[in-house]
Image: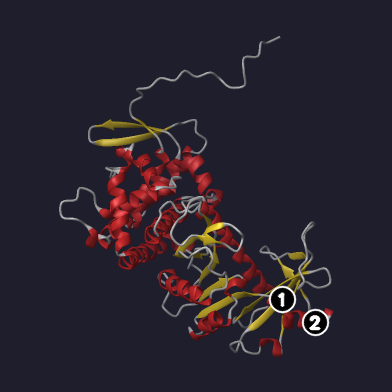
């Protein structure tokens, strides 16, 4: 009988290892920055905040923060991860220098945020051109999903307040460009709001849509089809009326609250008017039907709107609401898209749930909490989080293939970014050798080869 000595092998630890690089897979993000031209664009945008004798470029400092967040950091001090590997990430500013830059940008937040957003929009257009058929606008349309997210505050911060879920913190409103089945999407807007702001605030939805539409259009012509999707929080008269004024090029698919009038109309819909709902693969959705409502239920709303209701058997354990009927869960939305079957329109609206994937990725990428005290500082932090999310969306879109393109931030970090490597210098060339036994080394090398084939900016 063999003597049991434990489940894991015993390893002796000694310090003093040379040329070993931690977070070696982070070169994927560095190369994405280089090929996208994000470094030069951000540096040019932040030139007004460049001090005469400063050692570190403010654009490089901001990008270092975004890289640290993309690698899993959640506060300014986590930039130390990059500072420890100058061979991969270059010279990185000290913590006091990083803090001073955040304060400087926060002092002129509107101007600074405008400059950063313009640079991101410029780079986004280039990335979408490089992505070709994989770009979000490859089908000729762009879909933008607006949704709110609660960020818990564990200390007393400016504008933190009780939320509608009886927590305490902030309630940002975010917008994501839908990458369709090819990814979780990329952020185009993030409005920082107090925690006690209502979910269905029309003014905030209008402001978010205005900010989102310009950078989201990419290389699509100004009047190209763009779809705005929201849940019932966007179903207000003012917001829908504003969308209707934008012209026919802007489609909308907006969730609505089941009012008493809508509920009464649903009860009058004959059985023959209900159509089976469908899944993304074209199959019938089990236990779900859709119907279009007409008549006075649309009074007071813009002309040309179609109101679609879905009824579905609730999953086991779900509690029905007062507005549900006949044991069925009711949901509804309005759209101005004509000439398409309601089952397809309902599926298109239901795919808005991919925005939840973007929110989950944001929570895992610096949005679990807001680390700074003042609102102006946290607005800059939100922009850093968006840059990090941009990189986590652009890198897979440009470099990864197959199921790896669908990996969310946590999986990218565990399998790719945290890979260890050995830095070998021969002559003037530096080579990063990755572990041969690591199962995902081939993903990294293949991705770097794909990035190397892309043209350099300019």
Q: Earlier in the sequence, mark 1 or mark 2?
A: 2
Image disc number at residue 269 = 2
The residue at 53%/64% (across/down) is 178
Image disc number at residue 309 = 1
- What distance separates the C-alpha of mark 1 from that of mark 2? 10 Å
Closest to the observer: 428 or 420? 420
Q: Quadrant of residue 85?
A: top left
Q: Residue 266 location, x and y as percent?
A: 77, 80
Closest to the observer: 341 or 262? 262
Q: Residue 227 location, x and y as percent?
A: 53, 74
Neighbor class of circle 2 (other Cα within 10 Å; few <14, some 14-19, many 20+) is few
The answer to the question of whether label 1 and label 2 lie on touching residues, with beta carbons closer than 8 A, is yes
Q: Is residue 456 above or below residue 429?
A: below
Residue reaching furthest to the top: 1
The residue at 30%/60% (across/down) is 105
Identify the secondary structure beneath mark 1: strand
């Amino acid at each position: 009988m063999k003597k049991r000595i434990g489940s894991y092998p015993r390893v002796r630890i000694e310090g003093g290892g040379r040329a070993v690089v931690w977070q070696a897979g982070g070169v994927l993000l560095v190369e994405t920055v280089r090929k996208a031209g994000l470094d030069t664009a951000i540096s040019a945008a932040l030139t007004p905040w460049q001090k005469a004798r400063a050692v570190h470029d403010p654009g490089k400092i901001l990008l270092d923060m975004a890289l640290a967040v993309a690698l899993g950091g959640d506060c300014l001090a986590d930039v130390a991860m990059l500072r420890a590997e100058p061979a991969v990430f270059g010279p990185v500013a000290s913590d006091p220098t990083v803090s001073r830059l955040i304060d400087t940008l926060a002092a002129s937040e509107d101007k600074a945020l405008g400059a950063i957003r313009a640079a991101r929009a410029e780079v986004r257009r280039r990335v979408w051109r490089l992505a070709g058929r994989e770009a979000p606008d490859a089908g000729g349309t762009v879909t933008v999903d607006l949704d709110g997210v609660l960020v818990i505050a564990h200390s007393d911060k400016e504008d933190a307040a009780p939320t509608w879920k009886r927590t305490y913190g902030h309630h940002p409103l975010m917008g994501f460009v839908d990458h369709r089945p090819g990814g979780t999407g990329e952020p185009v807007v993030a409005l920082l709001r107090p925690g006690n702001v209502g979910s269905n605030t029309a003014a905030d939805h209008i402001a978010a849509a205005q900010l989102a539409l310009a950078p989201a259009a990419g290389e699509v012509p100004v009047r190209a089809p763009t779809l705005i999707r929201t849940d019932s929080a966007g179903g207000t008269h003012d917001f829908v009326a504003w969308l209707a004024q934008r012209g026919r090029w802007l489609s909308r698919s907006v969730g609505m609250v089941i009012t008493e009038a809508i509920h009464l109309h649903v009860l009058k819909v004959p059985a023959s008017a209900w159509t089976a709902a469908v899944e993304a693969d074209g199959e019938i959705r089990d236990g779900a039907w859709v119907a279009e409502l007409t008549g006075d239920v649309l009074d007071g709303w813009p002309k040309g709107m179609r109101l679609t209701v879905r009824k579905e058997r609730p999953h086991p354990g779900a509690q029905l609401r007062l507005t549900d009927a006949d044991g069925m869960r009711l949901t509804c939305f309005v759209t101005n898209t004509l000439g398409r079957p309601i089952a397809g329109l309902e599926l298109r609206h239901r795919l808005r749930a991919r925005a939840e994937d973007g929110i989950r990725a944001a929570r895992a990428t610096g949005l679990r909490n807001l680390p700074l005290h003042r609102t102006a500082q946290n607005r800059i932090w939100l922009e850093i989080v968006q840059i990090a999310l941009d990189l986590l969306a652009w890198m897979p879109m440009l470099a990864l293939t197959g199921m790896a393109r669908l990996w969310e931030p946590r999986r990218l970090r565990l399998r790719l970014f945290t890979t260890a490597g050995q830095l070998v210098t021969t002559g003037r060339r530096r080579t990063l050798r990755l572990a041969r036994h690591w199962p995902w080394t081939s993903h990294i090398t293949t991705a770097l080869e794909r990035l190397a084939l892309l043209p350099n900016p300019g």
